[in-house]
Image (spheres, helix red, strand yellow):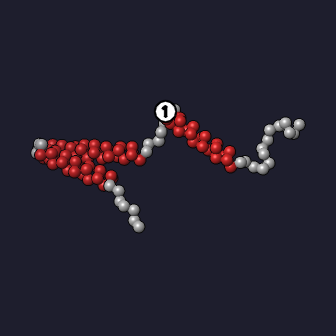
């Protein structure tokens, strides 16, 4: 009766079967991502794009807001708004260039 019941092979698992199971699991995960069943993780390009967009919007809005407030305080409409809007744009592009340039690996 002991021969009729399934059990583990006393010699251990075959490495080919383990490798096959890993490849099947990897293929199933890839197929789920392809079909849209599983959300794909954001890659580095998406993160960089979001960061660049945030820098650009933040520079524009921040410069315009500071300029508008100072214009209201000193009654210099629209000059400080224009100056700080320009400075915000320059700062945003400076940060974007700094984000997107990669340093060569040191040897």
The C terminus is located in which quarter?
bottom left
Q: Quadrant of the N terminus?
A: top right
Up/down of 19 relative to 4, above or below:
below
Residue 100 in sight = yes
Q: Is residue 42 left or right of residue 98?
A: right
Taking the image as shown, residue 82 lies to the left or right of residue 48, namely left
Q: Is residue 73 visible?
A: no
Q: Which residue: 53% across, 35% down? A: 32
- At numbered mark 1, what does the secondary structure look like: helix, strand or loop? loop
Of residues 4 and 38, the one nearer the viewer is 4
Tell me residue 76's x, y (percent).
10, 45
Q: Is residue 40 above or below residue 15?
A: above
Q: Residue at x 25, y 50 (%)?
A: 93
The residue to which callout 1 is attached is: 36
Location of residue 42 in the rendering, given as x and y in whole percent from the top left corner: 44, 42
Please give the name of the residue rendered at 26% of the width and 53% of the height, measured from the top-left corner.
94
Relative to the observer, which residue lies in front, 69 or 42?
Answer: 42
Image location of residue 74, percent across then percent down: 13, 47
Q: Where residue 14 sits: x, y (%)?
A: 71, 48
């Amino acid at each position: 009766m002991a021969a009729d019941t399934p059990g583990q092979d006393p010699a251990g698992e075959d490495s080919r079967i383990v490798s096959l199971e890993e490849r099947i699991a990897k293929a199933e995960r890839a197929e789920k991502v392809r079909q849209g069943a599983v959300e794909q993780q954001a890659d580095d390009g998406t993160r960089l794009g979001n960061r660049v967009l945030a820098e650009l919007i933040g520079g524009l809005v921040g410069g315009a807001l500071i300029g508008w407030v100072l214009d209201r305080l000193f009654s210099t409409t629209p000059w400080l708004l224009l100056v700080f809007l320009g400075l915000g744009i320059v700062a945003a592009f400076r940060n974007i260039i700094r984000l997107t340039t990669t340093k060569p690996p040191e040897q």
